[in-house]
Image (cartoon, rainbow, N blue to C red):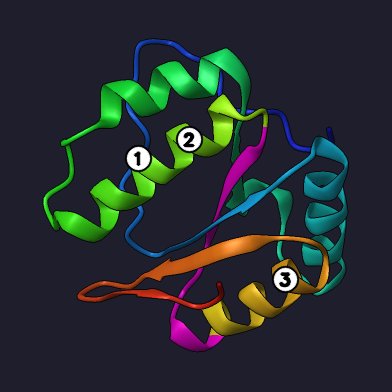
Amino acid sequence: MDVQPLHDRGQTVPSPSGRVVGFVNTQAECDAIIEALNAVGVPRKKITVLFGQEGLHILERSQGKFFMGDAESETVEFAIQELSNGHVSFAVDADDRDEASRIAAVITQNGGHTVSYFGPLVAERLTK
């Protein structure tokens, strides 16, 4: 995997605000998305990846910790299900809704699903 997953050091996931959050079924798909994002100018340092037991522990500690509420909580719950099934979760920093839409398009073209954008005041699902 080109981007190393977030390692469990007792932390919770960072706030999703200003990020596009999505999921893929395999690490190979995650690698393809990262490469495709990099090719369109999204640097690797803007991408966070969670998978495996370490990712699950981080997500479990994050349950109920977000200020905005339902959308974040639902995403954390979904991420726990995805990682429990051996899938991968990732977040990509996005400056605004337009950039989030471009990122979502790259993600879905490369096998990603259930992509959401968490803007400063709104959370919205960008894909199925």
Q: Nearer the viewer, residue 116 or 128?
A: 128
What's the distance in space between the residues labelled 1 and 3, CA to CA? Answer: 21 Å
| Left or right for 110, reference 78 | right
What's the distance in space between the residues labelled 1 and 2, CA to CA? Answer: 6 Å
- Amino acid carrying label 2: it is Gln
Q: Is residue 97 magenta?
A: yes
Is the residue marked by circle 3 packed among few (<14), some (14-19), or many (20+) residues within 10 Å?
some
- Quadrant of the rendered image containing residue 127: bottom right
Q: The C terminus is located in which quarter?
A: bottom right
Q: Is residue 69 magenta?
A: no
Q: Nearer the viewer, residue 26 or 85?
A: 85
- Residue occupied by mark 1: 77
Instruction: State the image coordinates of residue 100 (x, y, percent, origin top left).
Output: 53, 77
Please, what secondary structure does the residue beneath circle 3 have? helix
Please, what secondary structure does the residue beneath circle 2 have? helix
Residue numbers of the magenta segment: 87-98
Give above or below for 46 relative to 64.
below
| Left or right for 32, reference 15 | right
- Quadrant of the rendered image containing residue 51: top right
Instruction: State the image coordinates of residue 88 (x, y, percent, origin top left).
Output: 65, 38
* Residue plotted at (42% across, 16% down): 57
* Residue plotted at (52% across, 24% down): 55
* Residue plotted at (40% across, 22% down): 58
* Residue plotted at (28% across, 21% down): 61
- Residue occupied by mark 3: 108
Is the residue marked by circle 2 packed among few (<14), some (14-19), or many (20+) residues within 10 Å?
few
Is the residue marked by circle 1 packed among few (<14), some (14-19), or many (20+) residues within 10 Å?
some
- Amino acid carrying label 1: it is Glu
- Residue occupied by mark 2: 81
Which is more N-terminal, label 3 or label 2? 2
| Left or right for 50, reference 121 | right
